[in-house]
Amino acid sequence: MKASLDNIGVLTISGTTDKNLQLRIYSCQDDFVVPLDSNGFKQYDTLDALHMEEMMKEVYSWRKDPHEFLRRRGLIAKDSSADDELYILIVEGFLIFNHRPLNEMFDMRYFLEIPYDVCKKRRSMRVYAPPDPPNYFDGYVWPMYLQNREEMERITSEIVFLDGLKPKDEVLAAVYEDIRKEIARLQGQS
């Protein structure tokens, strides 16, 4: 059986969800970032900064045959059976809803949001190589977030917005319950 759960929002939540559901695969948009430019810098907050077609190939491959997808990557034994297995794909990334072909493949959509001041504080605590230039957050990161979010809301429906200020366990419990209900629904269709 295949199901796809798409975009938990952050790696921490996605990783925790994986442990609770014994998921089989997780795809992170960060794995598809275009290499840095000759100055060692890249504007990451645009779709052209990402190898979206490569990410799509990964998702298509999983959707075609998740068992074979995992077997080829050595994530399950070659002789294991696919009978009665439930495969759930989590696709995580900050622009996955802005890429319409990918977005249209999702069964469930979650967007973890935090307010400007919290986002700016968290960003300032990260260490980047190369480091952010002065005023980068206010001059580029936040305006691009607002632009991308507006586009996402215009082209995407059925997004569940999660409060990133709530404790991680509380957010996870809500997502987990949704996933559990979707699994029960899918198993009832078998």
Image: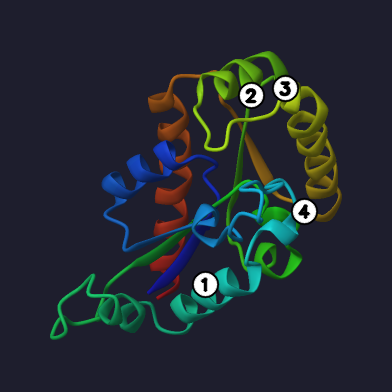
Tell me what residue is drawn at x 51 percent, y 19 percent.
125
* C-alpha gap between disc 4 and disc 1: 19 Å
Q: Quadrant of residue 51?
A: bottom right
* Residue bearing the label numbered 2: 114
For residue 45, above or below residue 133 = below
Quarter occupied by the C terminus: bottom left
- Which label number is shown at residue 134? 3
Q: CA distance from mark 3 to mark 2?
A: 22 Å
SS assignment at label 3: loop
Specify few, some or many for label 3: CA neighbours under 10 Å numbering under 14, 14-19, or 20 or more: few
Figure quadrant of residue 116: top right
* Lateral position of residue 99 relative to residue 181, left or right: right
Where is residue 92 drawn, in percent x and y?
A: 52, 51
**Residue mark closest to the camera, 3 vs 1:** 3
- Work out how far the residue at label 3 is from the one at label 1, CA to CA, in angstroms: 37 Å
Query: Mark 1 = which residue?
Result: 59
- The front one of 190 and 71 is 71
| Label 3 or label 2, whichever comes before in sequence order | 2
Residue at the front extreme, as displayed: 39
